[in-house]
Image (cartoon, helix red, strand yellow):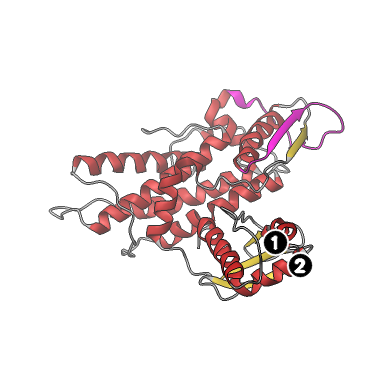
Amino acid sequence: MTPVELSRTVLRAVRRAVDGGELSVAVPRRAVVAPPGPGGCGDYATSIALQLARPAGRPPLRVAEILRQHLAGADGVADVVVTGPGFINISLDGTAASAAALTREILDAGPAYGHADSLAGQVVELRIPYDVRAEVVADALVRIVGSQGGRVEVSHREPVNLRPVPAPDDPALLGPAAARWALLHPAAHDRPRITADHLVQRESNPLFRVRYAYARTRALSRNAADLGFTSVPGDVEEEPHQTPALLLSTLTDHPRVLARAAAHRTPDSLARHLVGVADAVLAVLPAVLPRGDEKPSAAHRARLALAEAAGAVLAGGLSLLGIDAPDHL
């Protein structure tokens, strides 16, 4: 189940409670779901009970309990737990979203897939030292936090609250893309490597794999157009030696990764996630185009749509890190 589908499931629970006379409120247009905060549990949490408590004239915990009962039996939901003042924590049953639904959702959103408003109205103050790595990390966090509706204010005032381990050498020698990757890919407490390894065009270079995977998805779209067909979202069957299930899993997890990277100020977790997406999509690309005299089929169109969706996630993630995604590599 994707976050958008879960949001709709939460709204359906509200609507059922209203129709059953348990709550007297206007059904909201949307329900925000995000990874649980401290003290939470499960895969996602929503504060909609707190949002509806005042108009319903009920305590938030009572509203949450009413909604919990309606959510507990919903398709794709394994467990629902109420914590704190009325947060509803939802565990999914592990059933992957259909390839067609997930692909369509990503293609509709484009590189903005995974953007949400879980941090709406929040201002994050980053106080950093005069250090190039700190500057780059803060710059990436401005975009990552912004993708979740928050705002970052960066200053060089004391006391510093963001101090990643400095780079041992000048990263500018690597060029813009490789320099940013070298500073952002390691966790803040790890010393970054400023070496030519970030420039080699081999599978051993994670940055190359991410950008190459994106370029390959763009090339497949061009090649498909030359063959006279375009992408159409659909269910994707397993092919020998191909693992679309892994790709579907990594794409489904993207909104959660973005939300956590914003909440915990960890652009490195986004960088590592993009490597996982790249490795997963590279494994399925050989089955996208027809082979030999084979005619384009619905399966080819569905695989192409899934590849394009992965490309959108890679492009969006690289953009948040401040790194370009080249169409040709």
- The amino acid marked with disc number 1 is Ala
Residues at badges 2 and 1 in contact (C-beta under 8 Å)?
yes
- Label 2 crowding class (10 Å Cα cut-off): few <14, some 14-19, many 20+? some
Write the residue at 77% across / 35% down.
Answer: 125
Image position of 34 with respect to 117: above or below: below
Along the line of sight, the residue nearer the viewer: 261 or 164? 261
Write the residue at 50% across / 51% down.
Answer: 276
Magenta stretch in the rendered image: 148-172
Secondary element at tag 2 = helix
Quick check: 303 left or right of 79? left
Spot the residue most to the left: 293
Image position of 127 with respect to 298: above or below: above
Give the numbered dot on residue 49.
1
Q: Which residue is mark 2?
A: 61
13 inside magenta stretch: no
Residue 87 x, y percent position in the rendering: 72, 62
Along the line of sight, the residue nearer the viewer: 171 or 111? 111
- The amino acid marked with disc number 2 is Leu
